[in-house]
Amino acid sequence: MRFELCFLTRLSDDEVRTRRTLKEATGRRLRVGRAPENEIPLKDLRVAAHEADINVRDDDAVIEAVEGHTLLVDGFETTRAALTADNDVRVGPYRVGLTMPESPQADVAITVELVEFEDSHARPTILDPGRIRIGQGLLSRRTLSWSLFALVALIAFALPFLSYLWKPSPLTPLSAEAPMQAPAQPVLASLDTFWSSGDLSSSHKFLEKNCEACHVKAFVRVEDQMCTICHKDIRHHFDVSIPGHEALAPGRCATCHREHQGRDGVVPVQQQLCADCHKDLKEKLPGTTLINASDFEGDGHPQFRPSVTVDPATCAAERISIGAPNFPREKSNLIGFSHEQHLDQANIKDMVGRLAGKAFPAGATSLQCADCHKPDAGGVGMTPVSMLANCQSCHVLTFDQRDPQRVLPHGQPHEVIAALSDYYTARSLRQPAPSERLANNDPRRRAGSQQSEKTPIDLGRPVQNEIQTALQRVFADPKGTCALCHVTVPPDPAAKTDWQVLPVRLRAAWMPKGKFDHGAHRTTACETCHAAPTSRSPEDVLMPGVETCQACHGGQEASAKVPSTCIMCHDYHLEGMPRMAVAAIQGVDHASLPLACGVD
Amino acid sequence: MSTLVQPQRHESFLVHRRFLYLWMALILSVSSVVAYVWLEPVRGNEGGTWLGYTLGTIATLLIAWLMLLGLRKRIYSKGAYSLKAWVSAHVYLGLATAVIATLHAAFQVGWNIHTLAYVLMMVVIISGIFGIVAYARIPRRMTYNRQSRSLAEMAKLCAEIDQECGAIALPLGDRFVEAVRMAQQETRLGGSTWRILRARDPRDGTEQALARLRKLATETHGPDARAVSSLMVALGRKQSLLQTMRRDLRLKALMDLWLLVHVPLSFALLAALTAHIVVVFFYWG
């Protein structure tokens, strides 16, 4: 069979150029495809090597797609279609059609027209400007910049500020009665915690979500009144009403107590806060009895000056420097006591041995400090030594060798006198015999006569003498019962007084302005600080000097010792001073203020 | 007498005016450190001491000035100071800001907006350091990689290779043509930021076409085999061009990447810093 292959080239909408080729085919089947052996070769990569077959029949032609391929006929996909002059049959990018052959030798004419051009220059370039750079579109620097600006402004300012506006107005500070019951806040009302510059101290942690508990007025620093709602009893450091002190008056609470600095607390430990005034206080405050102090190292801290009782009758005390020529001797009315004697094993081992397992630990042969000096319940100080608890297990108050089981009460002198009178009177009644009694007071009478009221039972002068002797022995004999430890005063008939025992006036604390924690020092032997083993007199003030503390404690900058600042031993807010809260809020009532400590 | 004309040598912004701004930044940083150590306030350092306020003010002014570089860059006038002088000062004073702001914060951090501002500032500065490194090293690598060819030239070469492959493939079987079509149609440069930075496209058409052709080549004999080997040579050339282009895009992206952090976060910093300053006095301690 012969057929005409017409390649149409559309030059314009109306003008079509046709290139006709007369071709020979072996059968009536014309193969369409890219391969050169096809009867109708279509030189385009978009066409398969063999894509379709055209079966030419007597009066028409049918095009059929090879298996695995499809045709597009009038826009619809199909595998088979009649080939006419009118319908639009597509094989790949070509339109295939039927037309009248020009050559009389040809049975049929097939038209082929490339309708979908693939121009390599029109193909999307691999250098797509939208794809080859980072930071485009939503990720562009401008978009990102303003979005992040807005996001941070929202989180860092807008939301917390809304939270601030949310709070009740006017802001109500905490209730002083129940400060821990800070009102629960809705989440939105506590977003201003984003503004917190750091953790509150542990003791104020409960306020962490209630910024307004302290920050009451915007753009105004926290006022002292906010502190004194709870800390209403806080005391001044000195009497600010004394002339000359005004300039030394402290600033705001927050000058020293900085919050939002972490959990450790708001009590400052830096010695400079104290030393700024105390290093040259004598110059700043002429007339003060306080000694300058700047640091715990060397001469920076004055020698300790225990307050020692100098007159037990009035309890008058004097601060005497340890090591001064008039080294402190305490007149406490306690006499005869010797620490040396009590701690000397040779002296005491028989007595301790007898009481081991009872008053003392089993096997004890000597007294230890802790046998008498017991820590108090808090473990910081010591419980006072008492006759009842500490002395009388050894020092039994016997008064008559003939009756060693009998003991006197440790109490008031009149109780002792009464006990002695009772004892000797009773004793004489149990043993009525001495001839003196018969001679002076004959109980015999004539039969039938009544005993006269004028002749009462008179125990007589011997009993009285015995009582007086015993009183003398008990109260006055320095090796006797009371006077071994106590100062006693004999009776004075003119003043109608009986025997007296002067009360012992031991001081509760020799250095009341210095805090000392015995518990914290329990690994140190007592005698490291207290020279008890060589003390023979109860007048000895067994306090160590500052140099003893300085052996371990150094100044703030100490590297080989415990760095110790003022606040380790001293308080700033002193009991007995006027209230800070009063001063801060209502002004000071000068008349009601006690004298400042140390400034006479 | 002839005058010897010295060729004008390129001077990096880092060494501009004999490190003038480096010295300024060093003096500023060292004096801040000395003040911080020397004038230690009684209760320790923090932003709220007078030294803290001073350092904070200096840092704020520096940040405000550093951000003005973005405006200065857009003004094409010579002015009193060249853009190079600005960049030189920007780099060194920016580094000094890290020191000053750290001292202002006194090493205190927490989950709050103040630390947010500090962290944003540090990230901006660190990204800036990446930028210095990038500007110092990447241009040389780009030049070496491109071998004096432009991206457009390389893209044109690729298109020519595509055409050449099309011609070779025309008489070949469908499977070969599919491979060539794939190389032509499905080869893309760039895409997502990640893809640009990796400089690899796992579904690259050219690479897949080559893999297919390699497989087909073992089954092809006769005249087709010669055509297939020509195809593989052409696509190999294209692939090597593509690699060069991808490396170029990657290097360019690295030059841009730090800015993508540096600039947006500096705006975030501006918001956080403003909030920080307002809030400190709003809830004044």
Image: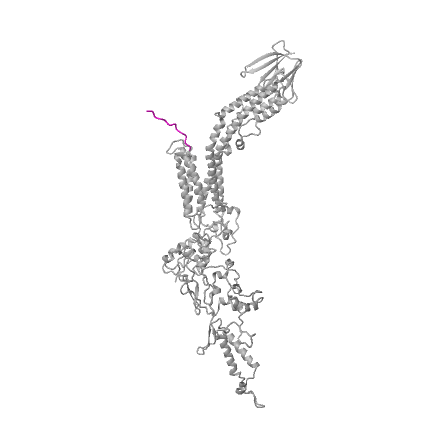
Relative to A596, say whether A403 is above or below: below
- Of the 4 image quadrants, the one containing the N terminus of chain A is top right
Q: Nearer the viewer, residue A578 or B173?
A: B173
- Of the 4 image quadrants, the one containing the C terminus of chain A is bottom left
Residue B213 quadrant: top right
Q: Nearer the viewer, residue A530 or A305?
A: A530
Instruction: Indicate the position of residue A167 as horizontal and vertical percent values.
Output: 49, 48
Indicate left or right for B285 with A187 as reference: left
Residue B17 lies in the magenta stretch? no
Instruction: Indicate the position of residue B24 as horizontal and vertical percent values.
Output: 39, 39
Residue B8 lies in the magenta stretch? yes
Q: How is the image coloured?
A: one colour
The residue lying furthest to the front in this view is A346
The residue lying furthest to the left in this view is B1
Q: Nearer the viewer, residue A277 or A362?
A: A362
Res A470 visible: yes
Type of secondary structure dominating the magenta stretch: loop
Indicate left or right for A401 with A305 as reference: right
Relative to B5, say whether A388 is above or below: below
Instruction: Indicate the position of residue A474 as horizontal and vertical percent values.
Output: 50, 75
Relative to A133, say whether A102 is above or below: above
Residue B12 quadrant: top left
Res A132 visible: no
Instruction: Indicate the position of residue A389 as horizontal and vertical percent values.
Output: 53, 67
Q: Which span is picked out in magenta? A: B1-12
